[in-house]
Amino acid sequence: MRIRHSVTRFFGIIVIPAVSAAAILYFGYYLIWGTRGLIALADVSQRLSVKEQQLATLAGQRNRLEHRIKLLQNGAEDPDLVEELAREQMLGSTPGQIAVPRERH
């Protein structure tokens, strides 16, 4: 009976708090430095913001190209755009032709 009481007391005083502290340290470590911890979250957030900026740039380019395609569809050709494209493709191809390129908007 005395041994049982001393074993129970030993577990109650030393082993249970030690195991609890080890579990808290283990999960605390992975909460901060783990593969999905707080430091990794900051890195992923930064990469996400860069990718969102790239997406916004690409979406703007896509909208611009879709608008130009609509201007060139059959039956609705924009004469100014057709002339612009022709000049871009033939710039410098005809001897003696002088072209002054304009700034793009």
Image (cartoon, rainbow, N blue to C red):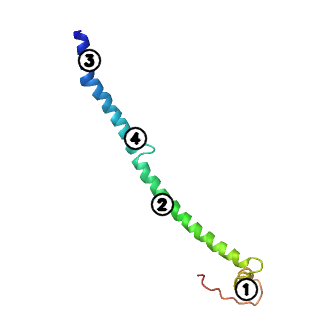
Residue positioned 62% across, 74% down in the render:
64
Task: Check disc 2 and give the amino acid type.
Answer: Ser
| Residue 67 pos. (x, y %) | 65, 75
Label 1 neighbour load within 10 Å: few <14, some 14-19, many 20+: few
N-terminal of the two: label 4 or label 3? 3
Q: What residue type is labelled 4?
A: Tyr
Instruction: Give whichever of discs 3 and 1 has the lower sequence position.
Output: 3
Residue 49 against residue 99 in the figure, above or below: above
Q: Mark 1 points at which residue?
A: 79
The local secondary structure at tag 3 comes to helix
* Residue 96 picture quarter: bottom right
Say which quarter of the image contains residue 23: top left
Query: How far from the left and from the top, in percent, is residue 73?
Result: 74, 76
Q: Is mark 2 on a helix, strand or loop?
A: helix
Residue 18, given in percent of the width and then of the height, sits at 29, 28
In the foreground, 71 or 40: 71
Query: Which residue corresponds to mark 3?
Result: 8
Q: Earlier in the sequence, mark 1 or mark 4?
A: 4
Q: How many labels does the image show?
A: 4
Circle 1 SS class: helix
Label 2 crowd bin: few (<14), some (14–19), many (20+), radius 10 Å: few
Within 10 Å of the Cα at label 4, are there few (<14), some (14-19), or many (20+) other Cα atoms?
few
Q: Is mark 4 on a helix, strand or loop?
A: helix
Q: Residue at x 44, y 53 (%)?
A: 43
Where is mark 2, residue-wise? Answer: 49
- The residues bearing labels 2 and 1 have C-alpha atoms spaced at a distance of 40 Å
**Residue holding disc 4:** 30
